[in-house]
Image: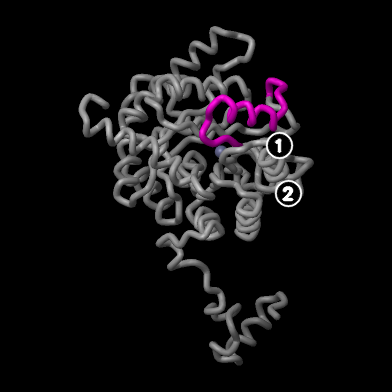
């Protein structure tokens, strides 16, 4: 990519564009959560969770990129999550690795350029890596490498390594981005389990700090936990990290008793909610707004939502961070609703009768 002066200077600009946004108190809003959203729409299988939709219905992926930007995402995160060798092997589509990644990346760059957004490449948990088995480290490195190289080729502004449960795997992702990423900045977000340590026993806060010390441009948490159980960790992380911190929770009502979305039960039952019935545990829009405001208060610089995200929730986060994306044109205006709105705007008799018949307290 850097064989002539023009592309070289473009590369330099790309490397700087992301970091520039984070300077002087700047922040970045990022929509994640494609896997669950496509499963909900009927284009992706729960269980395997492989993003085949990218090559089977590329226009729908482009549309979701557009929707998230319209709702306020500053970044088009290329939908290459779980488009890695191990996941593709699971469904016998290893041969499609280049095609699925290249398609997702190419469209992400196009949509980002159209709207003046950033574009990020994406690698994630390998489901291969074991801390004490070095042979798995080599396999994981190869998996990271092939996706990182493709992201660089398609002009990513930075690369996200996300949803790691072992600090060693997060560290390996960072090393690979440094080694194969042509100097692009790395955002490393770990998935915090239920306790205060990662799966390999590393303290969560110490682990996140070690990623910052090792040169990640942004460090933090994504996936796994919902707003309520991620926030206490974020506050601790903010105390020790000097650079930008990321927060992208799942949009479910995790609690101290059920701290991750894997552990959630359907309210009123003992049945596991993950993944098919998580809708029964979805955060209210109000809860998402409170989370976003709290993140802003504690100085989270890289904010968004992971599994369970949808455009309306991204808009809430974007608005809390002072954005006015095109979707704000349609932000709620319930004062104009014929039952719940301002009484003076509607014929009282009509509204009063409706209110009397539908139940509830409206005043
Ligand atoms: Zn997630």
Res 211 quadrant in image: top right
> Is residue 207 covered in magenta?
yes
Q: CA distance from mark 2 to mark 1?
A: 12 Å
* Residue 102 visible somewhere in the drawing: yes
Res 96 quadrant in image: top left
Mark closer to the observer (2, 1) = 1
Q: Position of residue 169 (x, y in %)?
A: 57, 21
Out of 112 and 243, give the one closest to the viewer. 243
Residue at the image position 31 percent from the left and 44 percent from the top: 59
Out of 269 and 137, give the one closest to the viewer. 137
Q: Position of residue 58 (x, y in %)?
A: 32, 40
Q: Position of residue 316 (x, y in %)?
A: 54, 58
* Residue 265 visible somewhere in the drawing: no
Instruction: Kindly tell me whether mark 2's CB lies below 8 Å from ligand 1.
Output: no
Residue at the image position 52 percent from the left and 79 percent from the top: 336
Q: Quadrant of ligand 1?
A: top right
- Return the residue found at the far right: 257
Out of 200 and 347, give the one closest to the viewer. 200
Q: Position of residue 239 (x, y in %)?
A: 70, 40
Stretch of the chain drawn in magenta: 199-220
**Residue named by callout 2:** 267
**Residue named by callout 1:** 263
Q: Seen in the image, is 69 located left or right of residue 59?
A: right
Q: Please, which colouring scheme is shown?
A: one colour
Q: Seen in the image, is 197 located left or right of residue 306?
A: right
Residue at the image position 65 percent from the left and 81 percent from the top: 355
Where does the N terminus fall, quadrant-wise? top left
Position above or below: 201 against 278: above
Q: Seen in the image, is 185 located left or right of residue 96?
A: right
Label 1 element class: loop
> Is residue 52 covered in magenta?
no
């Amino acid at each position: 990519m850097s064989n002539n002066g023009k592309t070289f200077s473009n590369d330099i600009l790309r490397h700087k564009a992301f970091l520039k946004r984070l300077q002087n108190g700047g922040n970045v809003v990022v929509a994640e959560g494609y896997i669950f959203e496509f499963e909900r729409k009927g284009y992706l299988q729960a269980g395997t969770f492989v993003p085949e939709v990218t090559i089977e219905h590329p226009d729908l992926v482009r549309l979701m990129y557009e929707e998230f930007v319209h709702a306020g995402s500053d970044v088009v995160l290329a939908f290459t999550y779980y488009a890695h060798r191990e996941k593709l092997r699971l469904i016998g589509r290893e041969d499609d690795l280049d095609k699925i990644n290249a398609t997702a990346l190419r469209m992400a760059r196009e949509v980002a350029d159209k709207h003046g957004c950033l574009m990020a490449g994406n690698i994630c948990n390998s489901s291969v890596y074991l801390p004490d088995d070095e042979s798995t480290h080599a396999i994981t490195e190869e998996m990271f490498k092939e996706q990182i190289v493709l992201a660089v080729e398609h002009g990513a502004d930075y690369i996200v390594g996300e949803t790691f449960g072992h600090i060693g795997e997060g560290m390996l992702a960072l090393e690979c981005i440094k080694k194969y990423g042509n100097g692009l900045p790395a955002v490393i977000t770990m998935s915090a389990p239920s306790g205060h340590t990662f799966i390999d026993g590393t303290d969560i806060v110490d682990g996140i700090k070690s990623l910052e010390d090792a040169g990640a441009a942004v460090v933090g948490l994504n996936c796994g936990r919902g707003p309520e159980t991620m926030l206490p960790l974020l506050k601790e992380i903010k105390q020790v990290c000097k650079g930008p911190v990321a927060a992208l929770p799942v949009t479910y009502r995790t609690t101290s008793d059920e701290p991750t979305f894997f552990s959630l039960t359907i309210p009123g039952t003992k049945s596991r909610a993950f993944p098919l019935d998580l809708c029964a545990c979805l955060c209210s829009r109000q809860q998402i707004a409170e989370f976003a405001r709290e993140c802003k208060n504690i100085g989270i610089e890289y904010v968004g939502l992971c599994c369970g995200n949808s455009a309306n929730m991204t808009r809430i986060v974007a608005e809390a961070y002072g954005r006015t994306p095109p979707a704000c044109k349609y932000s709620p205006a319930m004062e104009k609703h014929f039952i719940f709105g301002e009484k003076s705007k509607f014929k009282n008799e009509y509204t009063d009768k409706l209110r009397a018949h539908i139940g509830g307290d409206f005043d």
